[in-house]
Image (cartoon, helix red, strand yellow):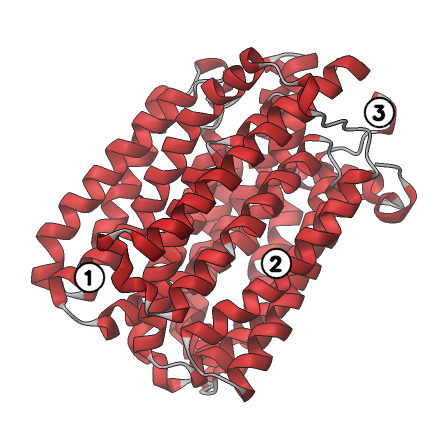
């Protein structure tokens, strides 16, 4: 792909943002229905099984998706691509198939796991692992090739297929975790089949005769530490659910936590995923072809805008986070409100800090990332052990906050100095001042006496527009310059520019 024809971060961000909105709409359709039809016990089962599936998927991939992204031959020819396709996609996926087959046998015959074989939910969940792994690997290939438009199409289609299948089964056949996994499996099989057809049309040869175990090992050497990091990161977010069930003996407690934490995570993904994907795929190419200084300039330009977005979202969560959650979930899930608000605040601010301290991946310091995540996971488990017996479900929330601080501080200390960046001081001060003005207006007027959730959200949106967005554009000339420049680059790029 000619360099001049590559979309920039802004184009990728626009595409991923549109995709994020469409995925968010799917959540607005599915979450209210699921929250009303599934009780806390079924949500607890979903939390436990989802945690196990995430761990197994990370283990079975051996970090293959990370190697696919980072080791893509941007400067290679046909020979390099043939080696890449075989040794970074075909061979690792065949290894995943072997491990998946062993897991199926273990569920059927190994005594510690046989007790789960009587539950159809376990079989249905395990069946979904292989298509999940295949989708993850091919999605990483799309990111490596900067096919953001296609990636968005796949993500949105996959999400809506899953919504239709899951809601169809949950509404009319089975209001259980089994029904949820059956719907997910149907959608994943359709998406995996479509991606296979796409792959066959790409110039990515995959032939067993081209296997080179040294290159396979090179991919594993990079990917396995990130696999370990992924597993540790999953434990970091899943150990709360597992320890809640173990320390309280209540699946309902797990459900209370899972409803709030899951929606908070989805909210964070909606806010940060588009930017993270855009920045990752472009920063790797810039680092390989132009150097760290170009990446740093790109990062600072993004941070100048992101600090305003984060402060505005924090203000909205503090005032109407409860309203947004209850509008989606209904009053029956009110116990999960503080979990959603606190964890959403953590994810939103953490996303900004994560971008500030990113850079380890570019220098292939995957082992450092793993060690940092391991420390955070150990801190999380220790804090859960101390806080859950005392504070119950909220103890898990406090433990998550503590481990996030450990993780963030560690990344700040380990980040390469030539890639460490903070938002501009003037932009940060302006954003905080405007955010404070919005909070004062909202709390002092009680949102002008509005009481319904929808009305409070609408009034808060109006306050942000008048007291935050408008003044920010007036006061910050650099912000106007960045946004105006980006708007000019975006013009016609969604459909018109080649990928």
Tell me the SS state at disc 3. Answer: loop
Identify the residue shown where x is 26% and y is 42%.
403
> Is residue 61 shown above or below 254?
above
> What mark, if any, has residue 244 been given in the picture?
1
Residue 365 % position (x, y): 43, 18
Q: Position of residue 426 (x, y in %)?
A: 51, 35
In front: label 1 or label 2: 2
Q: CA distance from mark 3 to mark 1?
A: 50 Å
Q: Which mark is residue 378?
A: none
- The residue singled out by tag 3 in the image is 1
Quadrant showing the C terminus: top right
Under tag 2, what secondary structure?
helix
The residue at which mark 2 appears reads as 188
Per the model, the C-alpha gap separating discs 2 and 3 is 30 Å
Q: Give 95 or 132, whichever is nearer the viewer.
A: 95
Q: Earlier in the sequence, mark 2 or mark 3?
A: 3
């Amino acid at each position: 792909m000619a360099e001049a024809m590559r979309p920039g971060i802004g184009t990728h961000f626009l595409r991923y943002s549109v995709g994020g909105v469409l995925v968010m709409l799917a959540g607005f359709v599915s979450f209210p229905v699921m929250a009303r039809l599934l009780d806390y016990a079924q949500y607890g089962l979903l939390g436990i099984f989802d945690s196990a599936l995430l761990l197994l998927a990370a283990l079975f991939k051996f970090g293959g998706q990370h190697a696919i992204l980072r080791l893509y031959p941007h400067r290679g020819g046909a020979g390099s691509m043939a080696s890449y396709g075989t040794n970074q996609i075909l061979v690792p996926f065949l290894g995943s198939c072997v491990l998946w087959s062993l897991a199926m046998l273990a569920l059927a015959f190994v005594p510690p796991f046989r007790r789960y074989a009587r539950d159809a939910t376990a079989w249905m969940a395990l069946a979904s692992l292989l298509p999940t792994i295949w989708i993850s690997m091919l999605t990483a290939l799309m990111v490596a090739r900067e096919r953001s438009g296609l990636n968005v199409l796949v993500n949105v289609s996959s999400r809506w297929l899953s919504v239709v299948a899951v809601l169809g089964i949950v509404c009319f056949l089975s209001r259980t975790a089994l029904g949820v996994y059956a719907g997910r499996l149907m959608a994943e099989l359709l998406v995996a089949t479509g991606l296979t057809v796409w792959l066959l049309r790409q110039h990515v040869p995959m032939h067993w005769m081209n296997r080179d175990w040294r290159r396979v090992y090179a991919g594993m050497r990079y990917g396995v530490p990130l696999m370990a990091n992924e597993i540790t990161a999953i434990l970091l977010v899943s150990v709360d659910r597992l320890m809640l069930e173990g320390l309280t003996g209540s699946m309902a407690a797990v459900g209370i936590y899972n409803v709030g934490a899951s929606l908070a995570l989805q909210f964070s993904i909606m806010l940060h995923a588009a930017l993270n994907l855009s920045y990752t795929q472009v920063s790797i190419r810039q680092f390989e072809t132009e150097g760290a200084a170009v990446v740093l300039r790109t990062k600072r330009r993004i941070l100048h805008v992101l600090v305003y977005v984060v402060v505005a979202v924090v203000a909205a969560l503090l005032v109407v986070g409860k309203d947004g959650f209850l509008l989606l979930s209904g009053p029956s899930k009110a116990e999960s409100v503080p979990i959603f608000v606190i964890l959403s605040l953590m994810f939103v601010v953490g996303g900004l800090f994560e971008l500030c301290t990113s850079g380890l991946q570019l220098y292939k310091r995957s082992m450092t990332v793993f060690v940092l995540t391991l420390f955070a996971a150990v801190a999380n488990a220790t804090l859960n052990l101390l806080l859950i017996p005392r504070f119950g479900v909220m103890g898990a929330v406090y433990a998550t906050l503590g481990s996030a601080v450990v993780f963030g501080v560690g990344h700040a200390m380990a980040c390469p100095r030539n890639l460490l960046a903070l938002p501009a001081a003037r932009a940060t001060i302006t954003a905080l001042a405007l955010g404070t003005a919005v909070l004062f207006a909202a709390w002092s007027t009680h949102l002008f006496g509005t009481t319904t959730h929808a009305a409070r959200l609408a009034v808060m949106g109006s306050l942000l527009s008048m007291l935050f967005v408008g003044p920010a554009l007036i006061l910050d000339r650099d912000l106007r310059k960045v946004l105006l420049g980006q708007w000019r680059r975006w013009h016609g790029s969604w459909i018109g520019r080649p990928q």
